[in-house]
Image (cartoon, rainbow, N blue to C red):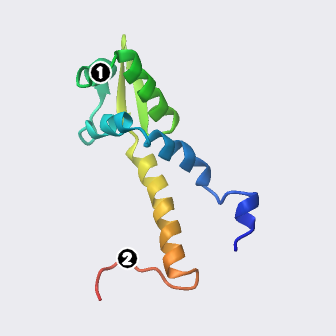
Amino acid sequence: MIKENARQLPEGWDRFAGFFSALGDPTRQKILLIFEPGEEICVNEIAAVFDISRPAISHHLKVLRNAGLVGNEKRGKEVYYHINYDYCADVLKLVHGFAENQIDGPDKEVTHDNAA
């Protein structure tokens, strides 16, 4: 038992709740999946591909932005969104590292090659 984790989360784990909570909604998952790599899309273009209101899309984008999954930039009257791939990768690497450590144990050397 790792009692210390009951007192304080390990470094970086504070990001998990918002990240995975934001991904818990199918509409937010779909919003992320419409982006091409490196693409920026304005709110109106995002809303046009969904059967829900623009304010509802704005709410979902706000949740994704607050969780760090997307960033935005205002250009004139439009707000453009992009996926924050670096942040997503960092959070997922932390989860992956935790799982690998649990499988391999703290004393085993972790290798990432598939040669067997």
Please state the horizontal and vertical placement of residue 10, each as a whole percent of the image. Answer: 65, 60
Please state the horizontal and vertical placement of residue 83, each as a whole percent of the image. Answer: 36, 39
Quarter of image, res 81: top left
**Circle 2: is it few (<14), some (14-19), or many (20+) Cα within 10 Å?**
few
Label at residue 112: 2
| 66 relative to 51 in the view: left or right | right
Label at residue 33: none
Q: Amino acid at mark 2?
A: His
Of the 4 image quadrants, the one containing the C terminus is bottom left
Q: Is residue 9 above or below residue 82?
A: below
Question: SS for tag 2?
Answer: loop
Q: Residue at x 28, y 25 (%)?
A: 46
Question: SS for tag 1?
Answer: helix
Q: Is residue 88 above or below residue 40?
A: below
Q: Earlier in the sequence, mark 1 or mark 2?
A: 1
Please state the horizontal and vertical placement of residue 104, each as a whole percent of the image. Answer: 50, 81
Please state the horizontal and vertical placement of residue 100, each as a whole percent of the image. Answer: 48, 73
Label at residue 47: 1
